[in-house]
Amino acid sequence: MDSFYIIATGSLVAISCGLLGCFLILRKMAMVGDAISHAVLPGIVIAFLISGSRDSFTMLIGAGIIGVLTTFLIEFFHKKGNLQSDASIGVTFTWLFALGVILISVFAGEVDLDQDCVLYGEIAYVPLDLWIGTNGVIYGPRPLYVTGGVLLIVLLFITLGYKELHVTTFDPAFASAIGISTALWHYLLMSAVSLTTVASFESVGAILVVALLIAPPATAYLLTDNFKRMLGITVILGVLVSFTGYYLAVWLDGSIAGAMSTMAGVFFTLAFIFSPVDGLLAKQIARRKEKSVKSLV
Amino acid sequence: MDDLIAFFSFQDPNVRYVAAGSVLLAVSSALVGCFTFLKKKALVGDAVAHSVLPGICLSFLLTGTKNPFYLIIGAFVTGWLALVLIDYITRSSKIKEDTSIGLILSVFFGIGILLLTMIQHSGNAAQTGLDSFLFGKAAALVGQDLIVFSAISILLVIVVFLFYKELALISFDENFAKSIGYPVKRLELVLTTLTVLAVVTGIQAVGVVLMAAMLITPAAAARFWTDRLGVMLLIAAVFGAISGISGAFISYTAPAMPTGPWIVLVVSMLALISFFVAPGKGIFYKIYRQYQIRKRILSENILKLFYQLSEEDGDHQKSRNIEELRTKRPIELKALKKGLRRLLLQGYLRINDNKWSLTTEGKIKGQRIVKLHRLWEVYLTQYLRIAPDHVHEDADNIEHILTPELESRLEALLQYPASDPHSSAIPYDQNMTKN
């Protein structure tokens, strides 16, 4: 049952991250996802200090605000300061992360957080973190409900805003021509990314969040040219990554989050070589065919 | 205060080690970071920082020791491999560079975490401290480590100076470098190697995530102060040194404070200050300049308004009240009043009984703006074939920017047209003749 809980939590996080990641990588904002996942650290610590508990709603809000603030700062330095966008991302998130680490050291006694846990998380503790009702009834692991709730929000967001997200991703000029605010949808998407990151943080850690935001969508992108199909493949890959990652971790007796990231890399490598659409082999064959056709002519 | 003296007298050998180590690491990564920044590959440093972890673990698994020399070799190999893979994925598929950076970063780090936890679970007693590579322990740098890291840092600085010209060229204009026969591929390799070396050594001080800041932040800050590469390197190095020594000092006075994050926080503060106050490129300076421009545009628009009104009734001396001005062009009341008062002080307007009129200087200036506006409209309709009813807005913007040189070239090009596309006369200066 424990393995089921862990794989289920991993899959829920993977699906939320992957769906949002599809939009991120097509908007060339993959590294903004990475930045948010690190920059929310001070938000988590501050919310922790204010609310005094882990499972509080304040934590989601606090860190969500910092997440959006991060993207705002990145845009601000890029647009107003003429700082190139990659440097703007790099300066902003490292600064916030440093602040977060310092806050943790200052309030070490009061905050039940440590850096290791924040960076690579401990999904193995999911089955231990039970949600116990007031009358002593055990409803199952709490992270399962949190990540499930987040997935629901993400699904709702993508379904309701599909048209707007789609058009602002693929044709921002057309979007503003027909009166869809690219800025509004940019910040809505960033809020969704922040929310997902924060909710996934304690269960899977920052690095697995980044891996799940980028690797499955990138893999799916190599397998299809159709956006809806890309979303579908990403969901399947997310579940596969959680499943295989968990058993790899059990087999090697190592970190589950690390193993899941590793498997995400393995799937990407497979797609990179064998994809019928865009794989190395397919391209090689196409080139050879072209050559033989030319030699016939 | 005692702490300050105790620290900066460098009597304590431990203080000497930590201070020297932090400064050397910060300076060498700041120098290398300038080149990656200019090549617009700032985030590559972040990727390398994450990718050295599996190398460190593999090297420990293979050799069974924590000898910094072996660990560095391992780190170097995977860090380097990561850069090559990022480049390869970007070149040979439709995956964009930022996606491949994020992908390699997270997957390599994931593999590293997996290996690290495997080592920890294996119960090998020698492994303790391996994870200091993750978070950095500048305050614990001692003896052997420090000699290795200092040697690498000094080597980095020397290589940057030796290859200064070549690195500068490939950072600014790769194609030009290629065309004049520079071995660009090999120079790229040098830069890649320098980046990986800087990251591998710096990680000891500040840890994985913050290593990216050591490369990017000093360079980004320095860029705001100068357009010259040499000066930029110097400023970045100074910022690096300041933050290195402050970080070391803070963790000396408050031992519970982590050195690395403080180094990054100090250098980030220097960068934030630079972003705002640097002359020329700083955000404050830009806001000030925009304010100046807006002020000038308002003044010019008011003078133009007076001139147009006096054209209508042929009297350039006529006094007008604010309401009359606003019926012709609805300028916001507060801004209009402010603008009028400014023009009065500058001598372009007169005030009499709450009514305003143009002085001779004011008339000349207003006339010039009207002339530029109409000339530009003629230019757009004649040369760009834009319909006459579409040219007004564009001319409204350009009239404030045209220089006297452009003005005379326009006049010559259009051969002093008598009227604009809306058949309003173009007012030329009376004293000027067609020549």
Image (cartoon, rainbow, N blue to C red):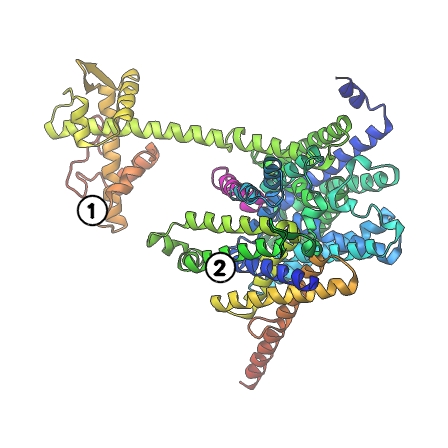
Q: Mark 2 — residue?
A: A155
Q: Position of residue B344 (x, y in %)?
A: 27, 17
Label 2: how many Cα within 10 Å (few below 14, some 14–19, many 20+): some
Residue B374 pos. (x, y %): 22, 38
Q: Are marks 1 and 2 on the same chain?
A: no
- The residue drawn where x is 58% and y is 48% is A198
Instruction: From this view, report whether residue A27 is shown above or below residue B160.
Output: below
Give the residues drawn in magenta, as a range. Answer: A69-90
On the image, the x and y values in percent for residue B241 come to 71, 31
The chain letter for the residue carrying disc 2 is A
Give the residue at the far bottom of this rendering. A296
Work out which quarter of the rendered image holds the N terminus of chain A and state it.
Answer: bottom right
Image: B425 above or below A253: above
Circle 1 or circle 2, nearest the eye: 2
Residue B136: image quadrant is top right
Q: Which residue is mark 1?
A: B389
How would you classify the magenta stretch by its main secondary structure? helix
Identity of the residue furthest to the top in this view: B353
- Taking depth in this image into account, of A229 and B157 the one nearest to the observer is A229
CA distance separating discs 1 and 2: 49 Å
For the question of whether residue B185 can be seen, the reply is no
